[in-house]
Image: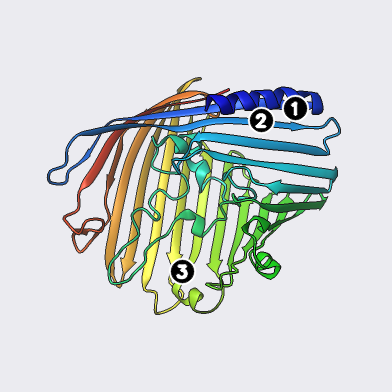
């Protein structure tokens, strides 16, 4: 890692000569689970820690703003291995931008407002909060038995963004209208299949908010792709409202995949008190799929002073399988000391109940139990 940092520093120095605007930044996240356990028989008091992020980034552009580049090295990453990412861009005119590469998985062109990662924001990356894009989806809804798949999260209804490498084209002839196209050439293969896998997004920025339609193709033939419709309403003072609709297209996949709808809101009630809430539902579209999926989260927050804020996350997940309920809940209060987007210390309590079906825990087949943990974290960048 030391060699990587030295190389990046040298590149930044050389780049400073070639580029009129250049910068280097870094980011570190360390999380400690002081204690974690459950009410399951035989459960013990455990502890753990991890470096969730050790990151160095550099970017620069020429003085005309027509060419630029960015790259990132993640020494600590969710995959367990260092990750190298980057892109270069060309903007010959204000109405057109071409990018080759990626932004390291964070995703371009996401349309989800506060319903995804932005629900907990940077706390998501530390693990002190329950989770960013889904909270319950995937982790708890899988494996309902009898071949049923209950997986569902908020990004079934909202497009979470394109995080892979690709050829990206942004066309914006007027301020209110944008067209975003991504062709995944880095996947290789037949050009026909590359175009079948394209991302196409129409982005309208209007006086009352943002309307966007996103289509992501699927060259594998498993479906006709996915379509998302998004409306972000900002016309009401101190209120942000997000509405999402997601659908898997074509043939048998439509019969087995639910129509997904989502609603999210952020309300600044006063200078010291606010609230976020989100609701997602997966609705059966065919008699072969008899599973209804519902997620609901609410996050009130209270500013104690300029540098300390208390958050209280409450959540409910429900799957209905032929009238039999699969239910789970969570309670996750935490405190943030520092700035919203800058360095911070975090401490919280996480309590969650595994989903139960006919009184059985879906993960182990045993009786349901309550999990709990006391995490702390430091999140700092420069």
**Disc assigned to residue 101:** none
Residue 55, image x and y in percent? 54, 31
Q: What is the distance, in whole Å, between disc 3 and disc 2 at their CAs?
A: 42 Å
Q: Which mark is residue 258?
A: 3
Q: For this view, does 76 lie left or right of residue 16? A: left
Asked if one can make out residue 24 in the rendered structure from this viewpoint, the answer is yes
Choose mark 1 or mark 2, whichever is in front. Answer: 1
Q: What is the crowding at mark 2: few (fewer than 14 residues within 10 Å), some, or many (at least 20)?
A: many
Coordinates of residue 19 in the picture (x, y in percent):
79, 28
Count neighbours of disc 1 (C-alpha within 10 A) and say few if under 14, some if 14 to 19, many if 20 or more: some
Q: Secondary structure at mark 1?
A: helix
Instruction: Name the foreground residue: 276 vs 125.
Output: 125
Residue that appears at 60% across and 47% down: 107
Q: Nearer the viewer, mark 3 or mark 2?
A: 2
Q: Secondary structure at mark 3?
A: loop
Image quadrant holding the C terminus, namely top right
213 shown above or below 334: below
Q: Are marks 1 and 2 in contact (CB under 8 Å)?
A: yes
- When the figure is inspected, residue 265 is found, relative to residue 361, above or below; the finding is above
Can see residue 20?
no
Quick one: label 1 or label 2, which is nearer the N terminus?
1
At a point 44% along the width and 68% down the height, the residue shown is 283
**Number of marks in picture:** 3
Q: Earlier in the sequence, mark 3 or mark 2?
A: 2
């Amino acid at each position: 890692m030391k060699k990587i940092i030295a190389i990046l520093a040298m590149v930044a120095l050389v780049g400073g000569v070639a580029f009129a605007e250049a910068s280097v930044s870094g980011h570190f996240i360390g999380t400690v689970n002081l204690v974690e356990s459950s009410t399951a028989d035989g459960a013990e008091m455990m502890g753990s820690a991890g470096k969730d992020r050790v990151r160095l980034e550099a970017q620069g552009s020429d003085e005309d703003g027509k060419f630029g580049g960015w790259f990132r090295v993640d020494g600590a990453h969710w995959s367990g291995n260092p990750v190298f990412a980057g892109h270069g861009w060309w903007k010959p005119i204000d109405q057109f931008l071409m990018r080759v590469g990626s932004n390291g998985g964070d995703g371009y062109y996401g349309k989800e407002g506060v319903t995804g990662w932005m629900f907990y924001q940077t706390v998501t990356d530390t693990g002190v909060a329950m989770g960013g894009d889904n909270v319950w989806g995937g982790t708890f809804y899988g494996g309902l038995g009898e071949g049923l798949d209950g997986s569902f999260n908020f990004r079934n209804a909202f497009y979470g963004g394109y995080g892979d490498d690709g050829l990206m084209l942004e066309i914006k002839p007027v301020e209110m209208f944008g067209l975003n196209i991504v062709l995944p050439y880095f996947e290789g293969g037949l050009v026909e299949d590359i175009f079948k896998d394209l991302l196409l997004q129409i982005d309208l920025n209007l006086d009352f908010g943002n309307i966007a339609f996103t289509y992501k193709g699927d060259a594998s033939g498993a479906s006709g792709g996915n379509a998302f419709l998004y409306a972000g309403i900002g016309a009401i003072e101190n209120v942000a409202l997000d509405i999402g609709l997601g659908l898997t297209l074509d043939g048998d996949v439509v019969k087995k995949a639910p129509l997904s709808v989502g609603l999210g809101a952020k309300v600044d009630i006063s200078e010291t008190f606010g609230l976020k809430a989100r609701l997602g539902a997966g609705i059966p579209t065919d008699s072969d799929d008899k599973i209804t999926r519902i997620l609901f989260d609410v996050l009130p927050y209270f500013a104690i002073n300029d540098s300390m804020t208390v958050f209280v996350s409450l959540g409910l997940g429900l799957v209905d399988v032929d009238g039999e309920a699969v239910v789970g809940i969570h309670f996750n209060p935490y405190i943030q000391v520092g700035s919203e987007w800058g360095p911070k210390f975090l401490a919280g309590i996480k309590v969650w109940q595994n989903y139960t079906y006919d009184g059985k825990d879906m993960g182990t087949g045993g009786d349901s139990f309550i999990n709990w943990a006391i995490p702390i974290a430091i999140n700092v960048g420069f």
